[in-house]
Amino acid sequence: MPSVFTHEFNTPAFKGKVSFSTGLFINGQFVDGSDNTTIDVINPTNGKVVTSVSEATPKDVDIAVEAAQKAFDTVWGLNAPGATRSTLMGKLATLMQENADELAALEALDNGKTFNFARNADIAGSIDCIRYYAGWADKVTGQVLETTEAKLTYTRHEPIGVVGQIIPWNFPLLMMSWKLGPALACGNTIVLKPSEFTPLTAIKMCHLMNEAGFPPGVINVLTGYGGTTGHAISSHMKIEKVAFTGSTLVGRKIMESAAKSNLKNVTLELGGKSPNIIFDDADLEQAVNWAAFGIFYNHGQTCCAGSRIFVQEGIYDEFLKRFTEKTRSIKVGDPFAPETFQGPQVSEIQFNRIMSYIESGKQAGAKVEVGGERQGTEGYFIQPTVFTNVDPSMKIVQEEIFGPVGVVIKFKDEDDVIKQANDTVYGLAAAVFTQNLNRAINTAHRLKAGTAWVNCVNSLNANVPFGGFKQSGIGRELGEYALHNYTSVKAVHVNLGHKM
Ligand code: NDP
């Protein structure tokens, strides 16, 4: 029998008791992993074990795939009208809404993000996403294509079948929702692996999916490690599609496993080193506020974080002064305290990785304008950090740090900054700050990125596509675009009388 996670929250932001089973969720039931092993869940605020969850093995992946296939062949896929899928997804969104505080508290406990951001961004965005795709479930249609009068030709957008989904720890419930929404709307069944660092909201969601009335096997959630469970999903011969969010390094492995197994369809949402460009004529106060939000939101653990801040020479000194002041004023601390902006990094591994990037910047001769050290002695807190005096060869300029560490770089003019901004293997997002409309639009168009923000950053909507150019990914999530990831298009030719 899987263990039950019980926790009493007594925080300024949320008070209440949560209690739920932490097993693998297969065929609508919570079960132990086939090896009966577990994974500890750590509270990043103090490094202590919160609970443990069942660990899935490749054998459990086989069992989950079988359950998902059975559900696809009997109660889901083409056997469940879009309206039925829509109703269930709508019920799930309502239950998420009813449990929003609890979900936010779990996210804060497990990931270290603040309760406020979890509640107002992650959970609210997750509910929006499931509702948005509930609306699509009965609107997935093909086309009638005119050919000749002797033929009726049309396309059907059929669900793919059993799909695998592998998600990271930075926005646990939000990434789950981005994956579940379009897959369910199109009629697929799912085997999903959350990150073992942050499994709690995914498991809570399984309870809500049962309550909503999803048939057993439609959604299966396996907590496990990437190298075993994740690999078993991406290389499974009966999984027809895999969607992944995480590092470019692992994204490559996913593609390789897909190629070496059954050539499954792959979508990847990967890393970034997003440029944030601030021209001389920008509203300076706004640019400072947004730039800080761009890099420090979610502790810098955001794939589209504006980690390279380019500032035009005319305002560089004033911008830097205000930006370092703003950075210094950021409240780092308890995720449940109302005034906190930044909690701990998600794990000791990430903490060490970020600190080693900070060290490499110092060693390479970059100047620490603010921060640059661990905060406190307990948990995985890092001071919001700003480097200047950098050059393009430095690791801190080229690589995704995924922490509260930004670099500020001076530029001359539009051509200069576009060249520098595009000088990266990534292409996820970019931002431009200016009050000149022509310059804003020209720059947005010249940047090689899947998302270009003008006078804002980190702004996303469920109905607007998100994804990367270059090594930031393949395919688009969100919006109508994401539906294309989850259907197979069949062309049907009906002979209306042509004789041989
Ligand atoms: P990973 O890319 O390693 O992990 C993302 C997910 O993939 C996790 O569920 C992980 O499981 C799984 N995974 C790992 N290896 C495999 C594999 N061989 N086959 C299938 N699945 C696998 O991210 P990390 O947690 O290691 O973070 C490392 C870096 O990745 C960060 O510093 C950041 O730069 C980047 N990152 C980017 C994200 C984004 O949104 N673009 C999100 C998270 C990280 P497990 O946790 O067990 O390894």
Image (cartoon, grey):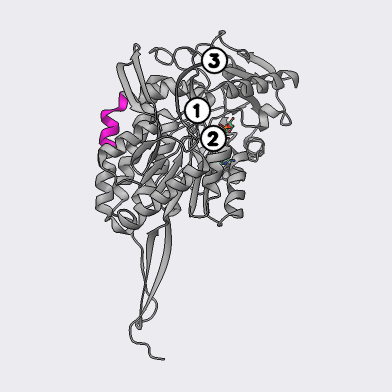
Could you tell me which residue is drawn at 43 percent across and 16 percent down? Answer: 335
Q: Quadrant of the C terminus?
A: bottom left
Kind of residue indicated by mark 2: Tyr
The x and y percentages for residue 252 are: 62, 45
Q: Is residue 324 magenta?
A: no
Residue 464 visible somewhere in the drawing: no
Q: Is there CB contact under 8 Å for labels 2 and 1?
A: yes
Q: Earlier in the sequence, mark 3 or mark 2?
A: 2
Q: Is residue 35 left or right of residue 96?
A: right
Kind of residue indicated by mark 3: Phe
Kind of residue indicated by mark 1: Ile
Q: Earlier in the sequence, mark 2 or mark 1?
A: 1
Q: Which residues are magenta?
A: 93-101
The quadrant holding residue 393 is top right
Q: Is residue 95 magenta?
A: yes
Q: Earlier in the sequence, mark 1 or mark 3?
A: 1
Is the residue marked by circle 3 packed among few (<14), some (14-19), or many (20+) residues within 10 Å?
many
Could you tell me which residue is drawn at 34 percent across and 49 percent down? Answer: 185
Mark identifier at residue 381: 3
Tell which quarter ligand 1 is in: top right
Q: Tag 2's secondary structure?
A: loop
Q: Quadrant of the N terminus?
A: top left
Looking at the image, the residue that sits furthest to the bottom is 500
Q: 105 above or below 459?
A: above
The x and y percentages for residue 476 are: 48, 47
Mark identifier at residue 39: 1
